[in-house]
Amino acid sequence: MSLMKRTSLMPWVDRFFADDDFFNRWWREDRLPAVNVAETEKEFKVEVAAPGMKKDDFKIEVKEGVLYISAETKAEKEEKEEDYMRKEFSYSSFKRSFYLPENVKEEEILANYKEGILYLTIPKVKVEKKEKTKKIEIR
């Protein structure tokens, strides 16, 4: 008789019960939307995955060199029938912040929300490299 490794037909169930901190980890990690940041010569492009939201749910602001992206949604549904009443509500929010480099035009940041993704375009300022020459005296 040989020893066999125990395998489960539902590995996600095993992970659920094996992880003591499952709920805390889920709340911290999965509640923030995924963000992609790409840099080109002329701009930074930021994509925030936020499906199911509307553009009015977002608040975007720049304060002291930090870009803040936040959103809040509330939904309430109520059904009343002769024999029963059902009321459901949900609330969801997030806030992300990003330090902006000094070479961006904060006043020209553009935002667009389309098909569940918030797109931000952050233009760069062209920085002229000044070549400084300093003569050092030999003593």
Image (tube, helix red, strand yellow):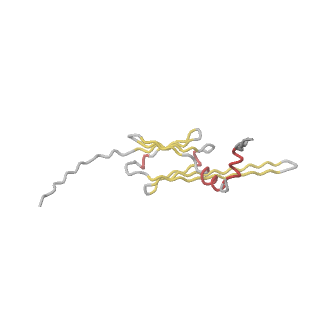
Q: Quadrant of the C terminus?
A: bottom left
Q: Residue furthest left?
A: 139
Left/right placement of residue 13 relative to residue 124 reads right
The location of residue 70, given as percent across then percent down, is 55, 52
Q: Residue furthest bottom?
A: 139
The location of residue 56, given as percent across then percent down, is 58, 47
* In-front residue for pair 133/116: 133
Q: Exactly how many numbered labels are in the figure?
A: 0
The location of residue 85, given as percent across then percent down, is 82, 51
* In-front residue for pair 139/102: 139
The location of residue 54, given as percent across then percent down, is 60, 44
Point 77% across, 51% down: residue: 87
Q: Residue furthest front?
A: 1
Q: Please tell me in which quadrant of the rendered image residue 126 appears.
A: top left
Q: Quadrant of the N terminus?
A: top right
Point 85% across, 50% down: residue: 84
Point 43% across, 46% down: residue: 108
Q: Residue furthest right?
A: 83
